[in-house]
Image (cartoon, helix red, strand yellow):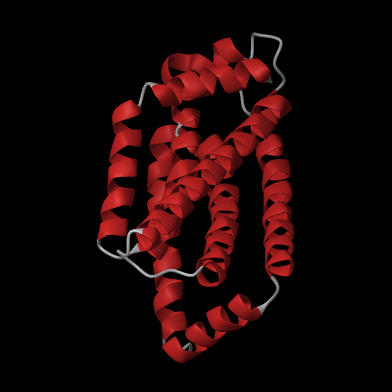
Amino acid sequence: MKGLFVKDFCFVMKRKNTLLIMVCLCVMYMLLGMGSFALAFMTWMGAAVMMSTLAYDAMNRGLSYLFSLPISRREYVYEKYLLCVIGGTLGMAIGLFTAVAGSLFGIEEIQLSEILPIAFVGYVFMFVFCSIFIPVDIKFGAEQSRIVTFGIMFVIVIIGVVASKFVSEEMIDDAFTYIGNLPLPIVGLTGLVIGAIFMVVSAIISVCIIEKKEF
């Protein structure tokens, strides 16, 4: 599995321009006083960049060659999930650093007691994001998965619009306030457990999908 990590990190480092743009956008959001958004943005984008290695692997029948090596399909799937978690974690760390830096320079007043719950919520959603789209990418491939992804996003937007009719902004604010008042270890542990459940179920599905595919 170590070789898979080396391969994927080499792929990611070839996209230095993309990584630089992400960091610049994060700094821009911080300068605009949108530190909380920058935090969520970097968390999700960090995972998304790592997830894009699935498309690189599928190019030019790369998976056929890859699985001719002493690498099991189960190991390949597990490595992708771990890679996305690493990417999301690094992205969240950069987002937190940017938000704290903005607070120290007086750009946006941020308290750790307020932003850390937001960070954990974003982290959990990153787990859900990966749990949904990694199996989709493995099942349909890079090209078709884009269409399926747009379909999933459209459904999510529709659900969000419908839910907004029944959930007021006050209820959302109350929910975040409640989360913010909880002890940080409880929030973190709960988020990690929820994320882990999604990841485990998704990984099982992905293994079943890839073991049935022919390359």
Which of 198/65 is in front? 198
| Numbered circles on residues, count | 0
Question: Does residue 161 appear anywhere in the picture?
Answer: yes
Which of 48/33 is in front? 33
Task: Give the vertical position of 118 relative to 200 (above or below).
Answer: below
Which of 152/10 is in front? 10
Image quarter (top left, top right, bottom left or bottom right) of the C terminus: top right
Q: Residue drawn 70% across and 29% down?
A: 211
> Is 198 placed left or right of 172 in the picture?
right
Task: Give the vertical position of 115 relative to 172 (above or below).
Answer: above
Task: Give the vertical position of 76 relative to 176 (above or below).
Answer: above
Find residue 205 and report its horizontal and vertical position in percent. Answer: 69, 44
Which corner quadrant of the image does residue 110 belong to? bottom left
> Is 113 placed left or right of 198 in the picture?
left
Which of 101/147 is in front? 101
Question: Does residue 212 appear anywhere in the picture?
Answer: no
Find residue 48 and report its horizontal and vertical position in percent. Answer: 45, 42
> Is 164 placed left or right of 174 in the picture?
left
Find residue 183 and report its horizontal and vertical position in percent. Answer: 70, 73
Q: Residue drawn 42% across and 83% down?
A: 164
Find residue 68 and report its horizontal and vertical position in percent. Answer: 64, 9
Q: Residue drawn 59% across and 34% down?
A: 83
